[in-house]
Amino acid sequence: MSQNKKGNTMDTILKTIDLTKKYDNKVVVDNLNIEIKKGEIFGLLGPNGAGKSTTMNMICDIVRPTLGSIEFMGKDFKKNRKELLHKVGYIPQELAIHGNLKAWENVELFTSLYGIKGNDLKKAIEESLEYVGLSERKNDYAKNFSGGMKRRLNIACAIGHHPDLLIFDEPTVGIDPQSRNFILDKIKESNRNGATVIYTSHYMEEVEAICTKIAIMDNGKIIACGSSEELKKLVVEDTEKISLEEVFLTLTGKKLRDY
Amino acid sequence: MIRYLIKNNIKLMSRSSINILAFVLAPILVSAVLMSAFSTLMEKYEDAGSFTVGYRVSGERSKLYMNEALSKMGENNEITFAEYPEGEIKDIVSKNKIACFIDFNDDKYTIYEQEEYKVQGKITEGIISIFYNSLSLGTTPAKAADITVNKADFIPPVDSVDYYGIIEIIYFGWCAIVCGAALFTNEKKNLIRHKFTVSGVSEFKLYLARFASLASAVVVGIGLSAVISSLVLGVHWGNLFLSALIVIFSIMAATAFGIMLYSITDSMVLTIILTFSIVWVWGFFGGSFETYMFSSMSQSLKNISPIYHENRALIEILVQGKSDYILSALLYSGAIVVGCSCVSVFACYLRRLGRK
């Protein structure tokens, strides 16, 4: 494994260094240091208000850190913002699509933002819709889609520019098992095709099924990080006797988090 | 590539039935209502032109000077005085094309006015009244007849159809931000803005895309409305090129102004309330409701309103073929576009910094 001049291993795609975010005097993310390797599916878990979304938003440049920095593909994110953002595909929890646009028009709008045009854009639209199984419905308005189809369209809008890093923020909320299964399969397929994935969800079984590395976050800090097996071993020796959800509740507590 | 963003934004705005209602149909409906409501009032302001007045001199003393005096008063004021010494006055009025009839006696006179020649009747009444007042002060009939009515030449002879047909197009154009309300609200509500941020598109390009798409959609909507009102209601526009230029500049200014309010407040509800309030005040000063020509508003207040410059330029282009307000209307709109655009981009930039 080669190293660059800053001492990062070359297969590190994303690294946060003492990443901190404060709102007024409240620390939401507290000196976060995570390292995501190229080709990983990195699961980020945590109760409501743990700081997951803020962390994701800082990685996507939607929120600026109060302190600390982010390195992406060995480069400082702040200094190479535009170049690096073009390598990120962001799939927000919200359905960030226009209901009054047809499926292909939605993909065109969001893919074109990355400077893709003409025939390349047409090709990217076809590929993206094909990828999420919406080719045959490309001329339908998004407002007429089911919840699962909208979720898939949301994904199609973020992958047309072939990003190296895909960030999924709870992409399976409120959809049927078939759509969920389809989306999870596609995430794994993207990963096999070379994309690194950051994935957040409240569904533990999903995270356990697809993530190669999982970080559990609480009160703005990573309280545990490793593979599913490694996390289970933090709680009990016999990992078959415990689920990831039980590990999560043991580490973060059962107290309700009303934020 | 913001051209795809512009294209899709235009599609989104044009697919909204509310926008079609607000920018194509509403200006026609509102102007039709105002045209009808103010048609009688505005008829009073029409140019009387030249007309004929019938008369009869019954008094013996009056016969000595009245024909000569009437001839002089007629020359000065484009009035033809025609004498009808015999016959029933009612018959004379109904059978001849005369604006009114005057029966002169030595000490008094009677004017028979007609409903359809109100303005001409009032002018005649005024002239004869001045003439008799002068006589009573001892002025000779020849001197007393030297009367010229000053026509108020600053009052453009425009009827309510043309006036409100034009003015309401400008007024609705100033509410341009309403056309983008659903789009901008959706962008905010569904966090589409975040996707813009993640794509690395600059605030300036995003502003440009919003401005170009919104202005284009409103120009098309308002343009359609103007064409339909011309065909259906018979609204005239005078010099089409100049009028179109002023309307397009006005819509661009309205777009920049609306986006600026939205960029500052970040709330579409607040933006629409502010837009309606400010545009209503500007419209009130500028003749969108009461005609600007007869408004008692001070000139300085009128000058504050960009709508006044635009309204006046368009009306004067129609009725006079030229206007001193064309340049000020275009410059005012241009200044609003530049100023509001700078503030918008700066506000978005600050918000992005603040958010972070």
Image (cartoon, coloured by chain):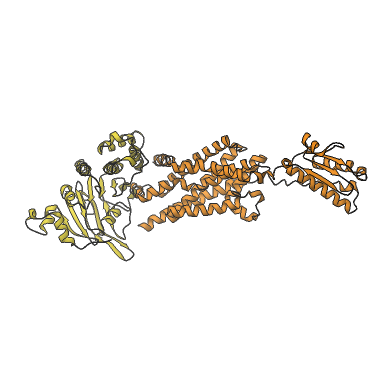
Chain colours: A yellow, B orange
Tell me which corner region of the image, top left, top right, bottom left or bottom right, holds residue B94: top right
Tell me which corner region of the image, top left, top right, bottom left or bottom right, holds residue B83: top right
- Nearer to the camera, B75 or A28: B75
Position of B290 with respect to B173 (left or right) is right
In the rendered image, the residue lying farthest to the left is: A238
- Nearer to the camera, B154 or A50: B154
Asked if one can make out residue A226 in the rendered structure from this viewpoint, the answer is: yes
Position of B279 with respect to A195 (left or right) is right
Q: Where residue B291 appears, x then y in whole percent?
A: 63, 48
- Nearer to the camera, A106 or B178: B178
Residue shown at the point (84%, 40%) measured from the top left: B55
Q: Where residue A174 appears, x then y in whole percent?
A: 25, 48
For the N terminus of chain B, the image quarter is top left
Q: Where residue B60 appears, x then y in whole percent?
A: 93, 44
Position of B272 with respect to A205 (left or right) is right
Identify whether A90 is placed above or below B90: below
Asked if one can make out residue A111 in the rendered structure from this viewpoint, the answer is: no
In the rendered image, the residue lying farthest to the bottom is: A25
- Nearer to the camera, A31 or B90: B90
For the C terminus of chain B, the image quarter is bottom left
